[in-house]
Image (cartoon, helix red, strand yellow):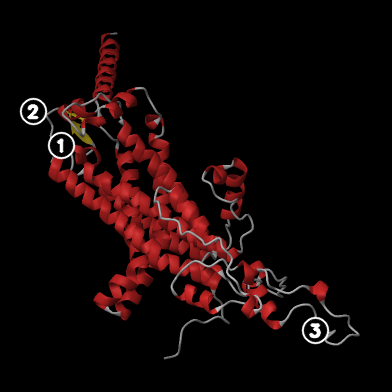
């Protein structure tokens, strides 16, 4: 069962690492679709 | 037109959808000078498909412009309504100072249809499909019951999967379940979460789902590559598969056909995961990096050239898509193929746990009882025993020297 738990832990590790690595590399779908001049939020 | 192509995509992915018949009789619009009539508006309000060629093509003609010295000579060959129609249908030549071809699309005509398809047809068909799969499995369980090990357990076990294989399996399985759940939440959030938990909770859950979905996708792709490398050799077709299929794999009836490491049913699962998983990954990457990886126009060129659209009785697929249309196709394809794979995986989870005694051990501890192995993978068990004997004989010979 250790392999199963290791695999599931691997999902968590890769998910978190992917977030930081891709952020460092500048890949972000949110940034790609918006910018300082584009704001979808409303003030209310 | 876009709708017709999406229906073709659905048919190709195994989810048939009834085609909407278009009325080929052109209505009389002489009373409005060729513009849309009250009947057109009412038909649209009834949700009926309308051939809007009469509007799409009605975008003026610069060649008919009056000479510059004549009356109205500086107004060109298009009226304002004609210009707006051209903008709406993307036939006007737009140039922008920044933003590239994405920004050059000022009005995206397919956007509303895509949104409507996503929140109605996709959601309904996808939801019913998954419920249908679950219902079929419940019915199967009630009729067939759990597939038991016929012979008494021997107490002797054989290694079915090594640790690294199980790691890859659970990496893929865990990420797929996460992706499936977060994907379903994204699609059904407005329908299910808002009535149950309110808009604030829905917003929080969907923001979290998007984060998980975007980042757990990498674990899925890593797992997909790993299982492909580990198991592709064992999943190549073999003549024993024919016998296995002919006897329905022992699932129906009491016979247990011989099988190697993977039987024909498992090979179907494997290739479904590999092919559909790769397709989902490709469309997912296209969504993850918006407008950077357009792939549908290129795919449509290949499908047209191979004559596949002709075989399906369709007009050639469009080979020039706006960046926004590429994203819409990517999103719909991603969701449709994911629904199909989710259905397959739900069946896989059933047979690997509740549906078959002893099956979970293969991916749990990695070891299965010889009685189970003999019943479901007799050729593989014989090969393993022969290899074990060979190793022992070699070991004895070495020791004797």
Q: Secondary structure at mark 2?
A: loop
Farthest right residue in view: B69
Callout 1 secondary element: loop
Distance, label 3 to label 2, CA atoms, is: 92 Å
Q: Quadrant of residue B94?
A: bottom right
Check disc 2 and report the residue beneath it: B152
Mark 3 sits on what residue?
Answer: B75
Q: Quadrant of residue B240?
A: top left
Dividing the image into 4 quarters, which one contains the N terminus of chain B?
bottom right
**Mark identifier at residue B208:** none
- Which of the pair B84/B230 is nearer the observer? B84
x, y percent for residue B65? 82, 78
Q: Please tell me which residue lies in front, B161 or B359.
A: B359
Q: Residue at x 45, y 90 (%)?
A: A43
Identify the residue at horizontal 33%, vertical 52% (top origin). Answer: B342
Compared with residue B394, is residue B149 higher up or lower down, i.e. above or below? Answer: below
Mark 2 and mark 1 lie on one chain; the one further toward the N terminus is 1
Answer yes or no: is residue B289 visible.
Answer: no
Residue behind mark 1: B147
Ranked by sequence position, the earlier of labels 1 and 3 is 3
> Could you classify mark 2 by the number of other residues whose Cα lies within 10 Å: few (under 14), some (14-19), or many (20 or more)?
few
């Amino acid at each position: 069962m250790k392999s199963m738990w290791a695999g599931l832990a691997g999902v968590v590790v890769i998910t978190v690492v992917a977030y930081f690595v891709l952020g460092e590399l500048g890949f972000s779908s949110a940034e790609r679709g918006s910018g300082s001049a584009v704001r979808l939020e409303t003030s209310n | 037109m876009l709708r017709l192509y999406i229906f073709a995509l659905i048919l190709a992915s195994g989810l048939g959808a009834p085609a909407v018949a278009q009325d080929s009789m052109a209505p009389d619009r002489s009373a409005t000078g060729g513009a849309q009539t009250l009947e057109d508006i009412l038909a649209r309000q009834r949700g009926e498909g309308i051939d809007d060629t009469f509007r799409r093509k009605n975008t003026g003609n610069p060649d008919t412009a009056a000479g510059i010295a004549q009356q109205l000579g500086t107004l060109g060959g298009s009226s304002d309504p004609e210009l707006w129609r051209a903008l709406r249908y993307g036939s006007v030549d737009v140039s922008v100072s920044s933003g590239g071809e994405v920004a050059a699309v000022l009005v995206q005509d397919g956007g509303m249809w895509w949104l409507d398809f996503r929140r109605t047809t996709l959601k309904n068909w996808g939801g019913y499909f998954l419920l249908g799969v679950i219902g079929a499995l419940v019915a199967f369980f009630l009729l067939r019951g759990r597939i038991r090990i016929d012979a008494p357990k021997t107490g002797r076990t054989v290694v079915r999967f090594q640790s690294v294989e199980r790691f890859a399996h659970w990496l893929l399985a865990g990420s797929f379940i996460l992706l499936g759940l977060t994907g379903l939440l994204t699609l059904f959030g407005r329908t299910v979460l808002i009535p149950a938990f309110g808009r604030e909770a829905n917003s929080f859950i969907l923001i979290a789902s998007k984060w998980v979905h975007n980042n757990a996708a990498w674990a899925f792709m890593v797992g997909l590559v790993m299982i492909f490398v580990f198991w592709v050799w064992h999943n190549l077709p073999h003549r024993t598969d024919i016998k296995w299929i002919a006897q329905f794999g022992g699932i129906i009836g009491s016979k247990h056909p011989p099988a190697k490491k993977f039987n024909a049913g498992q090979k179907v699962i494997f290739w479904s995961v590999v092919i559909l998983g790769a397709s989902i990954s490709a469309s997912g990457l296209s969504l993850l990096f918006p407008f950077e990886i357009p792939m549908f126009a290129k795919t449509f060129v290949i499908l047209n050239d191979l004559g596949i659209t002709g075989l399906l009785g369709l007009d050639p697929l469009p080979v020039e898509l706006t960046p926004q249309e590429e994203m819409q196709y990517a999103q719909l394809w991603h969701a449709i193929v994911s629904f199909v794979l989710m259905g397959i995986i739900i069946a896989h989870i059933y047979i690997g746990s509740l549906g078959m005694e002893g099956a979970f051990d293969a991916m749990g501890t990695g070891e299965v009882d010889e009685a189970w192995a003999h019943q479901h993978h007799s050729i593989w068990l014989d090969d393993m025993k022969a290899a074990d004997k060979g190793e022992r004989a070699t070991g004895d010979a070495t020791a004797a020297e």
